[in-house]
Structures are given as C-alpha cells and as structure tokens.
C-alpha cells in the first residue's frame, strides 16, 4: 500500500486529539506506511442551537464523516463511540474500538463538589441524560443547557457564568486537563451513555486492506462491553430522544451490564443489571433490554409507544 491512508475527524480540538491518538497507534504497528488526518465539519459542529433532546442519538456528529467514507474521501473515520448511532450505513461497519478510558462523568466547578454546591447553583449540562440524573440527585440545582466544545464549556465556569459543568472524564483526560476535574461522579447516580470513553473506528465493508490495518487497535474487553451496550441501545430504539444510559464491565470473563431508562421529564427512572459470559455480549445486551421493557421502559420511549 503506497498511498496515504486518510483518517477523517471532526475539527474540534478533542476530535483531532483523538484522531492523532489513533494515527499514532497505526504508525506504531505500521511504521512503513503513510497516514494523514482530514478535518470534516459535521452538523453537530455547525448547529449549536439544537435543544438537549435532539443533540444525541441522531448521528449529527458522524453523518458527514460517513458520507466522506462512502465517497472515498477518507479511509477511516474516528468517532467518540458514544456519538455513533447503532444503525450504521450498509456499506460501512465498526471495525475496531480503542481501549476505553474512564467512562464516568465528571464535574468541573469553582464552588466545590456536587454535594457541596449551594441550592440554586447553575450547572451546565450537554445532554438530557445528564440533566435527568442531576435533577434526580440534586433537584435544588438549576440545569443550564450547554453547547459548544470542551474549551467553550470550561470557559463558562472560569468566567463565572456557570457554577459548574458536567462532562465526560475521558474528554479531559485525552486533552491532558485532568487537573481541572473537581470530582469524578459516582456511577450509582450518573450512568454514562453507551460507548463513553471509547473511540470507534469505522471503515468501508469492502476495504480489506484498511481492515487489516485497524484490527490490531481493537481492544477485546472494551469491544465486548460496547457490543453489549450497543445491542441494549439498539433494542430500546437507541436513536430516540429518551434518556438511556448503559455501562458494561468485564472481569474474569464475566460481563456485567447496568442500564437505565428514564421518562423525558425525569419523573421516573428505571435501573436494571444483567451478567453473563463476556463471549456472549449480544445476548447480555438483549436480556437487559428485555428486562427493562418488562419493567415498563417502553412507556418512556416514544418510538415504542406507537
């Protein structure tokens, strides 16, 4: 392969950092090959006016990258896996996932930890999932919809516009900004979206050469966890606006999967867990989804009420 393999990425600082991490891993395995990064603007980057309930689950951060893959403008698309819808275009597929970083959410605040914040403190939130989990844990705080890149969000705290923001731990870790983290939030109260902390590597189905290049980057334990999570999400119509969270962890060949589905208004939240052999992640994801459906989760999901 003499041509340069082109890696597609969103243009944000975090996205480029993530693409560079994948590029470095590819060069380590294939030092004799050429790689480059192509920046691509997505709808999610251009449109900062979308309400919280329309920000996730509809592919606004991946569609343009997938179009570039299909058109042959890039050979690899690197995504924050949490942004990838469970439905992928027929000619593309998720070829590998990188080793997951800390999947938790974090608080950045100038006023202390979450439990210490004064009633009425203004907290910036970028997803309805986080908003509902926050008001369930601290109903006395004010939820403020948050858009923009990580820098923009952090500036709202340092400027005093907000008392704190909730972000993904992995974002600040990848940017080398761990020192800005005030608190890692408990998974008991803040369950992440499917795939948080992992990067997804998407390629064309018919591109066997690139498939061989990216396969060594696939982290097996992360792959098992996220397959279970994405199966769970898919069964629950994960492209919908309903607040859905799920996290899989593998220990000693056992995969434990915990999921949450909430009403959009946050009045009711359902939690459940399932475990089994890590070699059967689809089965575990399916079983957990069915368990929550039996508990009444379908009432919270508009697509399932029809």
Image (tube, rainbow, N blue to C red):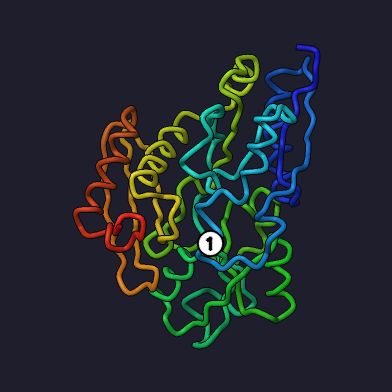
Give left or right: position of 271 versus 219: left
In the image as oriented, which residue stretches furthest toward the top?
1
The residue that appears at 62% across and 69% down in the rendered structure is: 146
Residue lying furthest front: 306
Image coordinates of residue 2 in percent, x first then y, are 80, 12
Give the residue displayed 65% in from the left and 68% down from the top: 49
Q: Residue at x 45, y 50 (%)?
A: 239
Query: Which residue is painted at 45% across and 72% down in the image?
Result: 134
Looking at the figure, which quarter contains the C terminus?
A: bottom left
Q: Which quadrant of the figure has residue 215?
A: top right
x and y percentages locating residue 26 in the rendered image: 69, 25
Residue 266 picture quarter = bottom left
Local crowd at mark 1 within 10 Å, few (<14), some, or many (≥20)? some
Looking at the image, can residue 203 be seen?
yes
| Residue 218 appears in the rendering | no
| Placement of 16 over or under 218, stated as above or below | below
* Residue closer to the observer: 43 or 75: 43
Q: Is residue 6 above or below residue 59?
A: above
Check disc 1 and report its element: helix, strand or loop. Answer: helix
Tally the numbered discs: 1
Give the x, y percent position of residue 77: 65, 35
Determine whether 69 is above or below 111 in the image.
above
- On the image, numbered disc 1 is attached to which residue? 54
Residue 150 percent coordinates (x, y): 69, 60
Left or right, 147 with reference to 59: right
Q: Quadrant of the N terminus?
A: top right
- The residue lying furthest to the bottom in this view is 119
């Amino acid at each position: 392969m003499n041509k340069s393999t082109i890696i597609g990425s969103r243009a944000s600082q975090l996205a480029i950092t993530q693409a560079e991490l994948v590029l470095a891993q590819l060069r380590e395995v294939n030092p004799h090959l050429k790689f480059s990064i192509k920046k691509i603007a997505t709808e999610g980057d251009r449109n900062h006016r979308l309400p919280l309930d329309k920000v996730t689950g509809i592919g606004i951060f991946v569609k343009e990258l997938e179009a570039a893959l299909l058109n042959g403008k890039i050979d690899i698309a690197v995504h924050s896996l949490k942004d990838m819808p469970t439905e992928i275009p027929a000619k593309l597929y998720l070829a590998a996932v990188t080793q997951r970083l800390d999947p938790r959410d974090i608080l950045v605040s100038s006023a202390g930890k979450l439990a210490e914040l004064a009633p009425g403190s203004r907290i910036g939130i970028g997803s309805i999932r986080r908003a509902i989990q926050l008001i369930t844990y601290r109903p006395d705080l004010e939820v403020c919809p948050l858009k923009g890149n990580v820098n923009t969000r952090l500036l709202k705290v340092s400027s005093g516009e907000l008392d704190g923001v909730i972000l993904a731990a992995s974002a600040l870790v990848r940017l080398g900004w761990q020192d800005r983290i005030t608190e890692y939030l408990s998974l008991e109260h803040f369950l992440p979206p499917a795939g948080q902390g992992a990067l997804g590597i998407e390629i064309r189905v018919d591109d066997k050469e690139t498939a061989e290049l990216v396969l060594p980057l696939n982290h097996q334990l992360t792959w098992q966890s996220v397959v279970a999570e994405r199966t769970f999400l898919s069964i629950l119509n994960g492209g919908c606006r309903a607040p859905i969270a799920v996290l899989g962890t593998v220990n000693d060949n056992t995969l434990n999967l915990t999921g949450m589905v909430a009403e959009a208004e946050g009045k009711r939240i359902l939690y459940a867990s399932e475990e089994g052999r890590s070699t059967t992640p689809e089965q575990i994801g399916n079983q957990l989804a069915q368990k929550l459906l039996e508990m009444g989760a379908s009432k919270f999901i508009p697509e399932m009420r029809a």
